[in-house]
Image: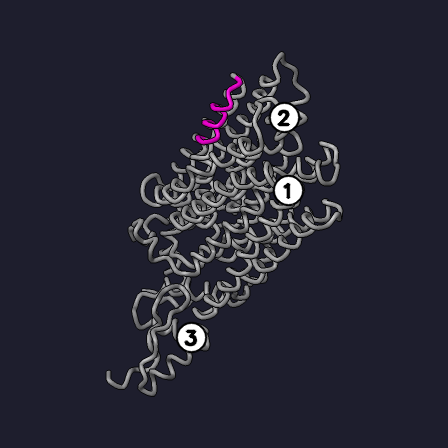
């Protein structure tokens, strides 16, 4: 009987735990492109993840690209026009959190994604049909149905990304997803008015209907991507035995009350930041025409710069955050830069191109640094619920602020609206400072450098291969400790019981020195 060396035994243990069957693979299955554990295959799947939301983002800003046209053809004011965005957001105040719960407990990530893309498709069809019969009410119903799937699809997309890329590449994956999503928004902003002007029907509302039906094709394309991911994600689970490696823990909605303070601060930052972005873009075209006297084509282009810049910047910033870490620092810079951009738009006559380029850059940076932080503060089996709740709170803010924004424009004008946006960003800036303090007190995981985070991840992966309690405690002992953890262990050694410390993941650290009473 041959005796394995420690290294060989370690490799065999990892192979068995991972459940890979590389010894039995041949042909395409043994290649990097086909094997689900290899980077090339994961990047191909990331491409399909990115296109999951292309149709949703293209259709979401259909109204913003045709604001003046919709108001004229459908005979509505700005407040009524903004209902097309509020009605998208209102159902997601509840359903985003519930959708995340369904992903975790009922449908699963695969079928949940298909169901949500189907709802988006149906909503866009109803929206276009409302224009076809010249009924603004039916258009509103279509936006409501569209919203039932839109944010839930974003939750599913985020959960897919974490499942495939949790660890060193997650920020890059989020950044690339945002880039492709905003490609849909950019294509919409730059093309949909041209589509409207290129078609000719007896009635203008029929031209609107034809224009909105172009979005249906993109929704079908996103649904095809959902089916592709269903097949390959199921194949990945079978090959890598991931289903057997699941935690087995059950998620309850009551777990929400146990979410850490740092997660709630992330939620507040999310909503107070994004209400200064999306409602502004929905009204931006007319703003640029009125204040800066830009022609319609130029106003549309300037308004699309946020999305256009995010096409490339999000991916690059994702790599930047992956390489440097320091998520909290990047979020702080992004909020501060966005506040400067809105201040320039409100109080100066500097070219709007400058302000919108800055706004687009900061928007891309924040998304790459903020959203991945959720995966650092909650267990993986609760990620669907956490991201769903984050989307729900974001949509509550967007639903309210969209209506408030339309009311402000109708009664007070765009200057007051910009001041209102700046006030929201100040709240976000305050919360990021508080989050830094809270995170530092708990070990500073959210603002770790890339080297520190990689060391922590490597230690966690190594821990999974250990089977005895003694080995697990030995590994934890060599994990770098914070100042507060070192102080606690010192107090324990001299006989003073410290306040229980944690390792940043919600787990109590074992004592390195026995208590004298023990």
Q: Which residue is mark 3?
A: 478
* Position of residue 41 measured from the top left corner of the image (x, y, whole percent): 51, 45
User: How many other residues sit within 10 Å of disc 3, few (<14), some (14-19) or many (≥20)?
Assistant: few
* Residue 18 figure quarter: bottom left
Q: Distance between the Cα atoms at labels 2 and 1?
A: 19 Å
Q: Which residue is mark 2?
A: 69
Residue farthest bottom in this picture: 494
- The answer to whether the residue labelled 1 contacts the one labelled 3, judged by CB atoms less than 8 Å apart, is no
Element type at mark 3: loop
The tag earlier along the polypeptide, 1 or 3, is: 1
* Position of residue 293 measured from the top left corner of the image (x, y, whole percent): 75, 37
What's drawn in magenta, residue-wise? 134-145
Element type at mark 1: helix
* Position of residue 75 measured from the top left corner of the image (x, y, whole percent): 58, 23
Element type at mark 2: helix
Front-most of 105 and 81? 81
Which image quarter is the C terminus in? Answer: bottom left
Residue farthest front in this picture: 411
Callout in the foreground (2, 1):
1
Which image quarter is the N terminus in? Answer: bottom left
Residue placed at 39% from the left, 47% from the top? 384
Q: Distance between the Cα atoms at labels 2 and 3?
A: 65 Å
């Amino acid at each position: 009987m041959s005796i394995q060396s420690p290294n060989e035994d370690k490799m065999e243990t990892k192979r068995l735990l991972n459940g890979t069957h590389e010894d039995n693979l041949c042909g395409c299955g043994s290649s990097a492109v086909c094997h689900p554990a290899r980077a090339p295959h994961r990047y191909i799947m990331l491409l399909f993840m990115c296109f999951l939301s292309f149709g949703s983002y293209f259709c979401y800003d259909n109204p913003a690209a045709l604001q003046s046209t919709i108001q004229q053809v459908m005979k509505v004011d700005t407040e009524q026009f903004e209902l097309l965005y509020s009605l998208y957001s209102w159902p997601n105040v509840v359903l985003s959190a519930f959708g995340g719960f369904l992903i975790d407990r009922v449908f699963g990530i695969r079928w949940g994604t298909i169901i949500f893309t189907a709802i988006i498709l149906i909503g866009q069809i109803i929206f276009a049909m409302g224009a076809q019969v010249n009924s603004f009410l039916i258009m509103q119903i279509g936006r409501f149905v569209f919203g039932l799937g839109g944010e839930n699809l974003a939750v599913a997309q985020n959960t897919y990304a974490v499942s495939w890329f949790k660890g060193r590449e997650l920020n890059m994956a989020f950044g690339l997803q945002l880039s492709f999503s905003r490609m849909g928004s950019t294509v919409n902003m730059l093309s949909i008015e041209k589509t409207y002007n290129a078609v000719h029907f007896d009635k203008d509302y029929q031209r609107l209907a034809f224009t909105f039906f172009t979005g249906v094709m993109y929704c079908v394309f996103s649904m095809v991507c959902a089916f592709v991911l269903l097949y390959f994600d199921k194949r990945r689970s079978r090959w890598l035995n991931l289903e057997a490696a699941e935690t087995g823990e059950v998620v309850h909605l009551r777990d929400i009350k146990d979410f850490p303070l740092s997660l709630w601060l992330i939620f507040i930052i999310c909503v107070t930041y994004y209400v200064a972005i999306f409602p502004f873009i929905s009204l931006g075209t007319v703003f640029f025409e009125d204040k800066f006297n830009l022609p319609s084509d130029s106003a549309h282009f300037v308004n699309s710069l946020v999305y256009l810049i995010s096409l490339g910047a999000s991916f690059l910033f994702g790599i930047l955050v992956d390489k440097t870490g320091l998520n909290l620092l990047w979020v702080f810079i992004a909020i501060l830069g966005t506040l400067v951009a809105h201040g320039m738009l409100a109080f100066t006559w500097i070219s709007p191109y400058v302000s919108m380029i800055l706004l687009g850059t900061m928007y891309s940076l924040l998304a790459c640094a903020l959203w991945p932080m959720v995966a650092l503060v909650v267990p993986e089996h609760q990620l669907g619920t956490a991201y769903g709740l984050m989307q729900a709170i974001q949509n509550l803010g967007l639903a309210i602020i969209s209506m408030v924004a339309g009311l402000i424009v109708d009664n007070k004008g765009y200057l007051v609206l910009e001041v209102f946006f700046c006030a929201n960003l100040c709240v976000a800036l305050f919360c990021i400072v508080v989050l830094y303090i809270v995170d530092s007190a708990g070990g500073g995981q959210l603002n770790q450098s890339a080297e520190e985070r990689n060391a922590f991840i490597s230690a966690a992966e190594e821990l999974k291969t250990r089977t005895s309690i003694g080995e697990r405690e030995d590994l934890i002992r060599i994990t770098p400790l914070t100042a507060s953890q070192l102080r606690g262990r010192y107090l324990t050694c001299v006989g003073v019981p410290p306040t229980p410390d944690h390792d940043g993941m919600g787990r109590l650290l074992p004592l390195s020195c026995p208590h004298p009473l023990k």
